[in-house]
């Protein structure tokens, strides 16, 4: 029996399936605020906000004519690529933009369309190459730098993305996508006060930027939760001042809210109790750098590196020797930054979307994850299942082989590979794969029944061919021959003539 919350969640999925991301965001956010216990709700909300933000940015770029028209041999191809991008046919747009670049490799607009299409299709490495080239051809113009920042942010390269957004704003202080991009980065790094300020700035410049409005609402809700955590941390550290972890939690909450003095004091309290807390040294260094004391930040980061087992970071040491303590501190932070696993997040999202029947969205999310980390076997596996659902067995075979190359003991992928071979009318390859996995699957409690069923299907797929060959041999006419003469009768005459004479007599 579906509850009211279940029905609302399913309605949100239906909105998401039809690209009505704003309605899905509104429904799922209301469920989240009501305390819905669904564990994946936050991930779905993040996916809807990401898709909505990308859609708005794409439409904004196409509508405002950021790509100046260039008369060249590839202009017609470029126009068709833009149309395909507006229709959300990302692979087609990428192919058309590539053809335009063959005609004119210096066509900056084609580079931007190719970068955008590759980003939306999940091919992040290709998107990065096109975005960098577009920024070079545009001589660092704000839209091109902002696009580069988007790609870098999607790849989890936070520091480089922030520098790209800063470069965009140095060219145009009213470029709303760059303010929005920086807000997303600050939100990911849990600098909530900064993120809210940046998102509000983006919304002030461009009130129609719905992605910034959604992000600002989410940040404000998160700020309310962190304020509650900070109050709890204050209470616990007063009751138990000897607990260093709670001092660190209080410092992290205060830093997220922009209360740097309280955060720094809490860090010092934690480190006075336990000087080996690398995460606290790291947080302290960030606060010191924000306060403008780069030399002290470098000292704290050295302690963080020692506590984390990192003895040296060559670029940071070289910059410190040259007296560039801010550059040294940034190098330390980049080396020690606990980078989140964006690849895993994309792949987990893709798997959930596939289970809900959203194949197109699942394929994009999985492609993004695998472009960052090709060694995730389950990402290749689900792409193989999507290809099978679409009736593309050859494509499924390629994905499932990649899954097995990444994880040689992936039994489910092996069985799906056999099924893909059978779907593609290749029983010989299916039989070969079954023989390879027989010792591991035939007696397996979980997969044995599926193995035997596939083995029967493989025999059935092979046997009709054998029967047809035998039937063809039986039906084949004998070669024409002269009939043998009749055997002689008792008097030397042919037997047939003797019998005929007797009958006449």
Image (cartoon, rainbow, N blue to C red):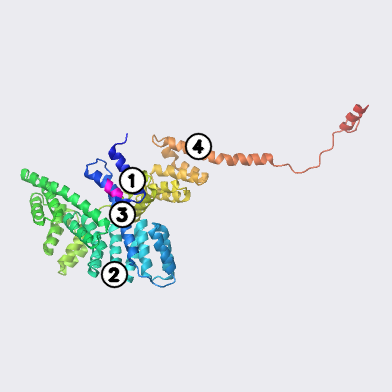
477 or 114: nearer the eye?
Answer: 114
Q: Give the quarter of the image for residue 102.
A: bottom left
1 vs 2, front mark: 1
Give the residue number, with chain letter if any, for mark 4: 456
Residue 265 percent across, percent down from the top left: 8, 54
Give the residue number, with chain letter if any, for mark 1: 13
Residue at image x 41%, y 71%?
104
Residue at image x 37%, y 64%?
113
Q: Disc 1 or 2, which lies upstream in sequence?
A: 1
Q: Disc 4 or 3, which lies upstream in sequence?
A: 3
Q: Which mark is residue 451?
A: none
Residue 47 appears in view: no
Main SS of residues in magenta: helix
Q: Mark 2 touching mark 3, by CB under 8 A?
A: no
Give the residue number, with chain letter if any, for mark 2: 141
Q: Mark 2 touching mark 4, by CB under 8 A?
A: no
The quarter of the picture where the C terminus appears is top right
The magenta segment: 23-27
1 vs 4, front mark: 1
Q: Disc 1 or 3, which lies upstream in sequence?
A: 1
The quarter of the picture where the N terminus appears is top left
Q: Disc 1 or 4, which lies upstream in sequence?
A: 1
Q: Mark 1 touching mark 2, by CB under 8 A?
A: no
4 vs 3, front mark: 3
Q: Indicate the secondary structure of the residue bearing disc 4.
A: helix
Decide: few, some or many residues near mark 4? Use Cα within 10 Å; few <14, some 14-19, many ≥20.
few
Q: CA distance from mark 1 to mark 4?
A: 39 Å
Residue 76 percent across, percent down from the top left: 44, 67
Q: Which mark is residue 52?
A: 3
Taking the magenta stretch, the answer to whether it contains residue 25 is: yes
Instruction: Give the residue at the far right of this rendering.
Output: 505
23 or 481: nearer the eye?
Answer: 23
């Amino acid at each position: 029996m579906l509850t009211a919350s279940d029905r609302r969640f399913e309605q949100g999925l239906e909105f998401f399936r039809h690209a009505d991301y704003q309605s899905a965001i509104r429904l799922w956010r209301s469920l989240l605020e009501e305390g819905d216990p669904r564990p994946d709700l936050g991930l779905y909300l993040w996916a809807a906000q990401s898709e909505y933000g990308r859609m708005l940015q794409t439409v904004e770029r196409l509508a405002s004519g950021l790509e100046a028209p260039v008369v060249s041999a590839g202009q017609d191809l470029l126009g068709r690529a833009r149309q395909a991008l507006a229709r959300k046919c990302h692979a087609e747009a990428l192919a058309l933009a590539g053809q335009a670049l063959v005609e004119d490799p210096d066509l900056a607009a084609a580079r931007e369309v190719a970068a955008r299409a590759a980003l939306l299709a999940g091919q992040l490495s290709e998107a990065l190459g096109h975005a960098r080239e577009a920024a070079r051809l545009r001589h660092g113009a704000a839209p091109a730098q902002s696009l580069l920042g988007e790609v870098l942010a999607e790849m989890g390269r936070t520091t480089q993305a922030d520098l790209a957004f800063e470069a965009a704003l140095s060219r145009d202080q009213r470029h709303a996508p760059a303010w929005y991009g920086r807000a997303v980065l600050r939100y990911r790094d849990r600098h909530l006060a900064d993120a809210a300020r940046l998102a509000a700035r983006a919304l002030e410049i461009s009130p129609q930027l719905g992605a910034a409005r959604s992000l600002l609402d989410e940040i404000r809700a998160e700020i309310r939760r962190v304020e509650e955590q900070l109050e709890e941390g204050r209470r616990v550290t007063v009751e138990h001042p000897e607990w260093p972890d709670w001092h660190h939690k209080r410092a992290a909450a205060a830093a997220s809210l922009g209360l740097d003095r309280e955060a720094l004091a809490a860090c010092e309290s934690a480190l006075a109790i336990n000087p080996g807390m690398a995460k606290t040294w790291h947080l302290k260094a960030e606060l010191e750098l924000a306060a403008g004391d780069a030399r002290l930040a470098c000292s704290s980061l050295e302690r963080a590196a020692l506590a984390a087992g990192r003895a040296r970071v060559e670029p940071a040491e070289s910059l410190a020797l040259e007296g560039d303590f801010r550059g040294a501190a940034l190098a330390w932070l980049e080396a020690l930054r606990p980078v989140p696993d964006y690849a895993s997040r994309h792949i987990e999202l893709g798997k959930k979307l596939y289970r809900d029947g959203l194949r197109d969205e699942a394929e994009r999310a999985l492609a993004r994850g695998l472009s960052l980390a090709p060694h995730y076997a389950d990402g290749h596996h689900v792409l193989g299942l999507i290809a099978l659902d679409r009736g593309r067995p050859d494509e499924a075979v390629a994905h499932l082989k990649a899954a097995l190359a990444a994880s040689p003991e992936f039994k489910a992928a092996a069985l799906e590979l056999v099924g893909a071979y059978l779907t593609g009318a290749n029983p010989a390859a299916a039989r070969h794969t079954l023989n390879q996995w027989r010792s591991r699957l035939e007696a397996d409690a979980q997969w044995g029944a599926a193995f035997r069923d596939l083995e029967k299907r493989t025999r059935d797929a092979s046997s009709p061919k054998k029967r047809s060959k035998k039937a063809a041999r039986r039906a084949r006419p004998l070669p024409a021959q002269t009939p043998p003469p009749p055997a002689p009768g008792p008097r030397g005459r042919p037997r047939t003539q003797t019998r005929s004479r007797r009958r006449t007599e």
